[in-house]
Image (cartoon, rainbow, N blue to C red):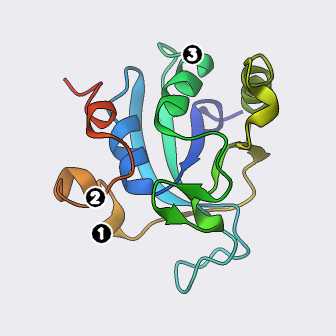
Amino acid sequence: MTLQQHNTLYFAGGCLWGVQEFMKHLPGVITTEAGRANGASNSTQGAYDGYTECVKVMFDSSVSLNQLFDYFFEIIDPYSVNKQGVDEGPKYRTGIYSKNQNHLDAASNYINKRSDAEKIVVEVEQLTNYVPSDPEHQDRLTNHPDDYCHIPLELLHKYKL
C-alpha cells in the first residue's frame, strides 16, 4: 500500500471551493486538491459526465479517520440528495471515497453508529476515477475570498490559524 493510498481520502460536499478551503486548514491535513470523483471518463474536457465535485485530502497520522469524518459532517447536510446550499444536481452529491477499503469501512462504521444513520445519504464508495480540477478552481476561496460558498463563514474559518 502506498503512502498516497494510505493517507488520502476524497470528500464530496457540494461545491468544491468551500470544501477545499475548510479541509485544508484542519489539523493533520498535509495538502488538498480540488477535483472530480467517480465519473465516466478521465478527461478534463467537457461536462465531467457522472462526476461529483470533491476534494482530495492527504493527511498524516496525527488525525484519525473519525476526526476527519467529524470535520466533514460539520460542513454538509448529510440528508440532502444531490444538493448542498443552493447548488443542485448530481455533481453536488455528498460522498466519501477512497482506494483503501479500510477507509471505506471506517466511514461506513462512522455513519452506522450515528443516531441519525437511517437518514444519511452520503455515498461511501471505492474511488474509481479522479480528475484534478483546472487551476482556476484550486484554492479558489483563498485566492478569491468573496466568491460564493454554501458553508457558513464561521465554519469556513473555524480552523484557520
Q: Quadrant of residue 115?
A: top right
Instruction: Tell me the kind of residue under disc 2.
Output: Arg
Instruction: Tell me the tag on residue 64.
Output: 3
How far apart in space, not on screen, are marks 3 and 1 (Cα)? Answer: 31 Å
Task: Give yes or no for contact between labels 2 and 1 (Cβ–Cβ under 8 Å).
Answer: yes
Instruction: Tell me the kind of residue under disc 3.
Output: Ser
Disc 2 is placed on an element classified as helix
Instruction: Tell me the tag on residue 140.
Output: 2
Q: Earlier in the sequence, mark 3 or mark 2?
A: 3
Instruction: Tell me the tag on residue 136.
Output: 1
Q: Can residue 101 be seen in this view?
A: no
Task: Give yes or no for contact between labels 3 and 2 (Cβ–Cβ under 8 Å).
Answer: no
Relative to the observer, which residue lies in front, 127 or 20?
A: 20
How far apart in space, not on screen, are marks 3 and 2 (Cα)? Answer: 27 Å
Asked if residue 87 lies left or right of residue 96, the reply is left
Instruction: Tell me the tag on residue 100.
Output: none
- Rendered view: 35 above or below 102: below
Q: Which of marks 3 and 2 is in front?
A: 2
Q: Is residue 28 visible?
A: yes
> Residue 147 location, x and y as percent?
24, 61
Q: Quadrant of the N terminus?
A: top right
